[in-house]
Amino acid sequence: MADETVSKRALFITFEGLEGSGKSSIISFLVRYLRKRKLSVKVFREPGSTKVGELLRNILLDKRKIISPYTELLLYLAARTQLIQEKLNRAFKDYDVVICDRFYDSTIAYQGYGLKLGRMVEKVVKIFSLGIKPDLTILLDGDVKKGLKRIRDKDRIERRPLSFHYRLRRGYRMIAKREPWRLKVVNADKSLQEISRRIKEIVDDFLRDKCIKKS
């Protein structure tokens, strides 16, 4: 599988977060900011951004569907490998920055911790990420109940009991504790202006370290 990946040129930034954390708004802000700096940017989402991925997304989020934990895990992995091979590998060569709304940390947090599938998830995630790793991950962390209250029409995942969402948050925090150099935690309960300012600081520091100076 490793032979099917390409040498990565673009900086790969991923966004993670609890339900209702406001990732979409922050990603839109960051895209505008980076483009003002004359950087070419491409955005993807997980699951999704391919025909196969969008079909799997519809299945996974459909509140009428009953899906076993292991089936759920496999569907997310399938969506990811399709995205990597169909879109990401090419984007890494064509753009300065590639942003993904969720990546493998979501699988570890949601299925490993949230669904209690355990450390096995980390092993299969490593295999089916095909050697692709984020350079920077921004985690929007906030109060579980506040986040869920922001969502009007909840999907299958969002409808899960609070205990699931608390395990999910604990999982994300464990990942952040293990990899603080990659995963930066941002308080999602602050105002959009405050969050945007913090994201800008994090990304500016990251680009400075990578010697990216376009503006």
Image: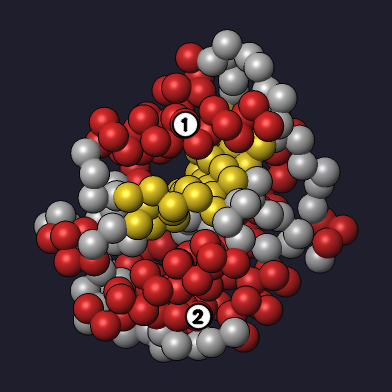
Determine whether, in the image, residue 161 is placed left or right of residue 131: left
Instruction: Give the amino acid at mark 2.
Output: Gly
Q: Which residue sits at x=51%, y=23%?
A: 34
> For the N terminus, which image quadrant?
bottom right
Residue 56 falls in image quadrant: bottom left
Does 201 appear above or below 121? Answer: above
Residue under pointer 1: 201
Residue 33 falls in image quadrant: top left
> For the C terminus, which image quadrant?
top right
Q: Which residue sits at x=62%, y=85%?
A: 120
Identify the secondary structure beneath mark 2. Answer: helix
Q: Nearer the viewer, residue 95 or 19?
A: 19
Identify the secondary structure beneath mark 1. Answer: helix
Does 28 appear above or below 50? Answer: above
Q: Nearer the viewer, mark 1 or mark 2?
A: 1
Q: Nearer the viewer, residue 158 or 4?
A: 158
Instruction: Give the amino acid at mark 1.
Output: Glu
Residue under pointer 2: 112
Dot 1, crowdedness within 10 Å: few (<14), some or many (≥20)?
Answer: few
